[in-house]
Amino acid sequence: MSLCLDGLTDEAGRFSILAIDHRDSLRQFLAPEDPASIDAVDITALKIEVVAALADLATGVMLEPEYSIPQVLDAGVLPDGVGFLAALEAQGYLDDPEATPTTLLDDWSPGQAKAAGATSAKLLLPYRPDGRLAEQQEATAIELVAECHEHDLPIALEPLFYGLASASRRSELIVETAQRFAAFGADLLKLPFPGSTDACASVTESLDVPWAMLSGGGTFVDFEAQLRTASAAGCSGFMVGRALWGEALRAAPSERSELLATQVRERFERLVAVNAES
């Protein structure tokens, strides 16, 4: 039986989630020539600034225990009534998504996420149904769903797709993965745009739990259009990261605050409006 996710939705049951749980990928995004130049203090400060600027528009925020749990909470920038999802997975998948199965962060568990106040856990798994590690990743997903539910903690599963050069194969893989992951007992699936209205509808029909669409680092214009298509076909909202705040975080520090307060807030408001129209 799925656990309640009311702490992450609006009154209509739709998700407007601010994603700021990035770690290795954020370093690479901000400094592709020298990711190691972005230190922990820098990452934490950026996350606090983004949450402070935007979380009042969100129904939930995606955080992680290395740089934002408990730092964002201690900073007092997460508004009352806005829950957070806690990432469980360790890093190390960017260079080779089939190098090893997904593992948990050291000294971190569903029980600790629950104790930290998380509304839900989140587990990212590099995955292809035809991939070398498919069976191991599926076993990991099933195990972590069970462990989260033992702690009365909902969990969102996020299959990380790779090798999606073919548009037609992309839709097939996303739909097939949604169908497989529907059997694992997760309370929410976080998925990329499946590629068409029909593919979105196929995902919706495959699930007895909600799915929310991730931005995946594309442009905001594309994401907004994709969200409209997906929402009309049964998607329950969005989890948005770099497509929302990417330009602001790459901007000069003197410009960042203004961009977050204007461009980025206006973007988030537009996405929330799409939810309201669906």
Image: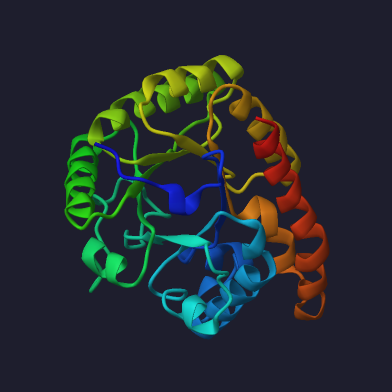
Number of marks: 0
Q: Quadrant of residue 193?
A: top right
**Which residue is outermost to the front?**
11
Residue at image coords 34%, 39% = 127
- 240 to 223, vertically: above or below: below
Residue 160 in sight in this render = no
Residue 188 screen position, x and y as percent: 39, 40
Q: Nearer the viewer, residue 85 or 247?
A: 85
Q: Is residue 272 left or right of residue 133?
A: right
Q: Quadrant of the N terminus?
A: top left
- 201 to 82, vertically: above or below: above
- How was the colour assigned to the protein in this rendering? rainbow
Q: Quadrant of the C terminus?
A: top right
Residue 144 in sight in this render = yes
Residue 122 screen position, x and y as percent: 37, 53
- 149 to 194, vertically: above or below: below
Q: Nearer the viewer, residue 270 or 107?
A: 270
Residue at image coords 83%, 63% = 262
Q: Is residue 212 left or right of residue 101?
A: right
Residue 92 screen position, x and y as percent: 36, 60
Residue 240 screen position, x and y as percent: 59, 50
Residue at image coords 62%, 23% = 232
Q: Nearer the viewer, residue 211 or 135?
A: 211
Q: Is residue 105 left or right of residue 204?
A: left
- 270 to 54, vertically: above or below: above
Q: Nearer the viewer, residue 6 or 33?
A: 6
